Image (spheres, rainbow, N blue to C red):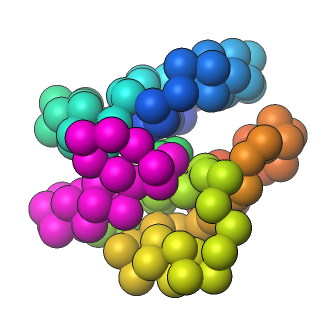
Amino acid sequence: MTSLRVLTVDDSRTILAMLHHTLSNAGFEVLQAEDGKQGLDVLKSQQVDVVITDINMPVMDGIEFIKHVRATGQHQSLPILILTTETSQDKRDQGKAAGGTGWIVKPFDPEKLISVIHRVVH
């Protein structure tokens, strides 16, 4: 059985390291990017099963990133989880309208994150 490939997009190296540690230990293959533009570059060359993205990032934020991913048509059914410190309903509405699949508030619980990934992929 092949492992699921997860793309994590966040400008915080600490969060990227925590996600890599958590997801790798759970058996996922992890690809990483530090902003939405880098995330799009990864998606152009790599097949992934799920994306986890932050909202507030330089160069291209998470909402813009999701809009671009959905606009390609190639990733219409790709689950995209938003992992952010944002808790406002307005931001949640923007994330949902852009095409986000789910919303998780930082700091994340590793077991819950893994459970959510399995739920949105299967």
Q: Is residue 46 left or right of residue 50?
A: left
In this picture, which residue range is highlighted in magenta?
Answer: 54-75
Q: Is residue 43 magenta?
A: no
The foreground one among 31 and 108 is 108
| Count of residue discs | 0
Residue at 24%, 41% in the rendered image: 59
The foreground one among 90 and 95 is 90
Residue 98: where, in percent of width, then height? 36, 74
Residue 107: where, in percent of width, then height? 78, 42
Q: Is residue 20 visible from the viewing direction of this image? A: no
Residue at 53%, 74% in the rendered image: 91
Quadrant of the snapshot with the C terminus: bottom right
Q: Is residue 84 left or right of residue 73?
A: right
Q: Is residue 73 magenta?
A: yes
Q: Is residue 9 visible from the viewing direction of this image? A: yes
Q: Is residue 36 above or below residue 21?
A: below
